[in-house]
Structures are given as structure tokens and as C-alpha cells.
């Protein structure tokens, strides 16, 4: 039988939590345009940016971001307010090639591209404490 309350995972300050979306029917170039805007931002700031952007790619990225934050809070007890996007990458997926019938028996090629999006979140509270400790140490040594 599994223990639920007594067993808790240790918080590893270096732990990175990610969510991966595969075979999203979008161009990788168009997805990179949005991902470049949110890389390095905090979780709350990224939600605001994605909700106000007018691009179609924002919705799948927003779903991935929610999923990554849910993984962080459920599996590792990280607070969503302390999360920062440490890494976000878009890679090219499969391309489905079709022929659209045209006049005089000809065929016009259509390419349906897909991409894979990976969003990595990291808890920044430990780094803030380490930075404050270094600043205090430097101040005391003067």
C-alpha cells in the first residue's frame, strides 16, 4: 500500500520541471516568434503576455505552460509565483504532404507542418536567497 501523507519529495533547488507538446499543427517559425518573447520571463508575466498576443500559436503554448506549472506544483511542491521559464525551445516536427486537385487534371502540393514545443520551468526562490546571502556577505566584508 502506498503512503500518501508521510512521503514527500525533497525540494531540489536545481530541479527543472518541463512540459512537452508534440505534433502541434503549427509552423515552427511562427511558434518561435512567440517563444522568443516569453523566454526568461516569470510565470505570471508570461500568462499576461500570451493572453494579450493576437497569434494563433499562443493557445497551445498557454496550455503547455499551465501543464508545466501544474507538474511543478503537484509533483515538487513549487509555488507557481516563484516559477521562471528557464528554457523554451521549438523544434520542427513532421510534414504531411498532400495534393490538392486543380484544373486540367493537375495537382497542387500542400505541406502541413507540425512542431514540437518544450517549456522548462525552474523555481527561483533558492537563487534569490543565495544572491541575498552573497550580497550580505560582501557587505560584511567591507
Image: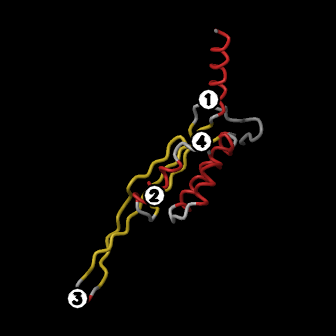
Relative image position of residue 112 (x, y in whole percent):
37, 69
| Residue 91 sits above or below residue 7 on the image | below
> Which residue in the protein does label 2 denote?
31
Residue at the disc numbered 4: 84
Q: Residues within 10 Å of mark 4 (few under 14, many from 20)?
A: many
Question: Contact (CB < 8 A) between labels 1 and 2?
Answer: no
Q: Are marks 1 and 3 in contact (CB under 8 Å)?
A: no
Looking at marks 4 and 3 on the same chain, the residue that comes earlier in the sequence is marked by: 4
- Label 3 belongs to which residue? 105
The residue at the far front in this view is 142
Q: CB under 8 Å between callouts 4 and 2?
A: no
Q: Secondary structure at mark 1?
A: helix
Residue 2 x %, y %: 71, 42
Mark nearer the N terminus (1 vs 3): 3
Q: Badge 1 is on which residue? A: 127
Q: Provide the secondary structure element on which disc 4 rests.
A: strand
Q: Residues within 10 Å of mark 3 (few under 14, many from 20)?
A: few
Instruction: Write the residue at 53% across / 44% down.
Output: 120
SS category of the residue bearing label 2: helix
Q: Is residue 27 above or below residue 73?
A: below
The residue closer to the viewer here, 109 or 84, is: 84
Expressed as whole percent of the image width and height from the top left, the position of residue 81 reads 69, 43
Q: Earlier in the sequence, mark 1 or mark 2?
A: 2
Determine the CA span between mark 4 and mark 2.
Answer: 19 Å
Gap between marks 2 and 3 measured at Cα: 36 Å
Q: Quadrant of residue 74?
A: top right
Disc on the earlier residue, 2 or 3: 2
Residue 84 % position (x, y):
59, 41
Amino acid at each position: 500500500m502506498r503512503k500518501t501523507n508521510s512521503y514527500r519529495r525533497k525540494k531540489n533547488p536545481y530541479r527543472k520541471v518541463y512540459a512537452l507538446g508534440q505534433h502541434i499543427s503549427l509552423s515552427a517559425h511562427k511558434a518561435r516568434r512567440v517563444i522568443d518573447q516569453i523566454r526568461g520571463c516569470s510565470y505570471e508575466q508570461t500568462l499576461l503576455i500570451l493572453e494579450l498576443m493576437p497569434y494563433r500559436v499562443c493557445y497551445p503554448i498557454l496550455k503547455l505552460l499551465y501543464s508545466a506549472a501544474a507538474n511543478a506544483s503537484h509533483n515538487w511542491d513549487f509555488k507557481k509565483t516563484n516559477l521562471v521559464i528557464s528554457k523554451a525551445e521549438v523544434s520542427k516536427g513532421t510534414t504531411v504532404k498532400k495534393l490538392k486537385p486543380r484544373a486540367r487534371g493537375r495537382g497542387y502540393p500542400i505541406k502541413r507542418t507540425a512542431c514540437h514545443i518544450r517549456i522548462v520551468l525552474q523555481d527561483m526562490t533558492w537563487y534569490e536567497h543565495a544572491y541575498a546571502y552573497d550580497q550580505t556577505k560582501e557587505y560584511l566584508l567591507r
